[in-house]
Amino acid sequence: MDSPPIGFGRRSRCAAAGCRAARAATLGLILVYVLGASSRPALAAPSVPLAPRTQRLAQLLSGHLVRLHPRAESRRIAAVTALRPITGERTTLPVIGESRDTQGIVWLEVMLPGRPNGSTGWIAEQGTRTLMTPWRLIVHLGARRVLVYREGKLVRSFGAVVGKTSTPTPTGSYFVEETLEMDAAEPGGPFALALSARSDALREFEGGPGQIALHGRDGLGGTLGRAESHGCMRLATSSIDWLAERIGPGVPVRIDWS
């Protein structure tokens, strides 16, 4: 949560190439599901349990009211817009449950962006499109590593700069809200994966909501393997480039202290 993610609300924007990259990443979720897994051999990770092979996603075709329970008369707890604020891409949420009410309406339990961290709720399936992603990220703060899983198998492991003691990276289960390309003059480039997580230490920074992201080190520096950021995870340029080409909205991200 360095300058780019915290300042999302005020000064970050999606360059044309970044919007194309985000759209391509979203399309890739569908293509991967249809075409199947890559033949690239997976890296061994004996100390890490295998991640689920795929994750169901709900892409919103319209704005949705979020209910506490899976029925229309249940209390409204939030509203989610159809488009993300930075890139204009369609909102894509991980689906963690499904229920049909007495009226025959299908409801989806989804993960929600923003505060409080880790929030979930129920939206109607109508007005959504189902996608599947084989990708999943697991961040180990103690090891200062970002692990990338595809169809449950570890395929990459990247060193990272994580949050320092005064502004720690929040732990929990989150997802990628948007994938964007940063302008050359903006710190934290060349790419950022803006997460659904928000800082527990900073409610606001530079006009933004304290949004956590995985991003580059352009204009920021930082030593990989150290805890010295404002909460975000900084990666080497080659690492964030690799992620930005593959990881689109909705991809689950788990952050823990191991």
Image: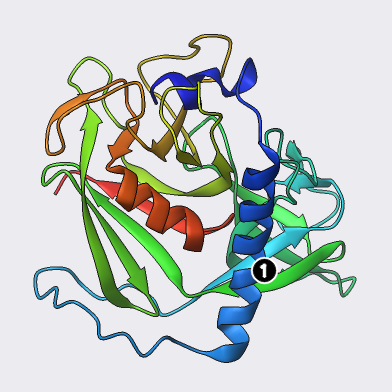
Task: Please indicate whether residue 71 sits to the left or right of residue 87 in the image.
Answer: right
Kindly identify the residue that appears in the image at 16 percent across and 68 percent down. 48
| Residue labelled with disc 1 | 27
Q: State the residue in front, 138 or 228.
A: 228
Kindly identify the residue that appears in the image at 32 percent across and 63 percent down. 148
Within 10 angstroms of label 1, few (less than 14), some, or many (20 or more) residues? Answer: few
| Residue 67: percent from left, percent from top | 74, 47
Which corner quadrant holds the N terminus? top left
How many marks are shown on the rendered structure?
A: 1
Q: Quadrant of residue 85?
A: top right
Eyeballing the image, is 256 above or below 186?
below
| Residue 93: percent from left, percent from top | 63, 55
Kindly identify the residue that appears in the image at 35 percent across and 21 percent down. 219
Q: Secondary structure at mark 1?
A: helix
Task: Point out the residue furthest to the top here.
Answer: 206
The image's colouring method is rainbow
Task: Please indicate whether residue 48 sits to the left or right of residue 235 in the image.
Answer: left
Kindly identify the residue that appears in the image at 41 percent across and 51 percent down. 241
Q: Is residue 170 visible?
A: no
| Residue 99: percent from left, percent from top | 70, 71
Task: Point out the residue furthest to the right here.
Answer: 103
| Residue 29: percent from left, percent from top | 60, 71
Q: Amino acid at mark 1?
A: Leu
Q: Quadrant of residue 161?
A: top left
Eyeballing the image, is 112 above or below 123?
above
Q: Is residue 203 visible?
A: yes
Q: State the residue in front, 109 or 198.
A: 198
Eyeballing the image, is 110 above or below 240?
below
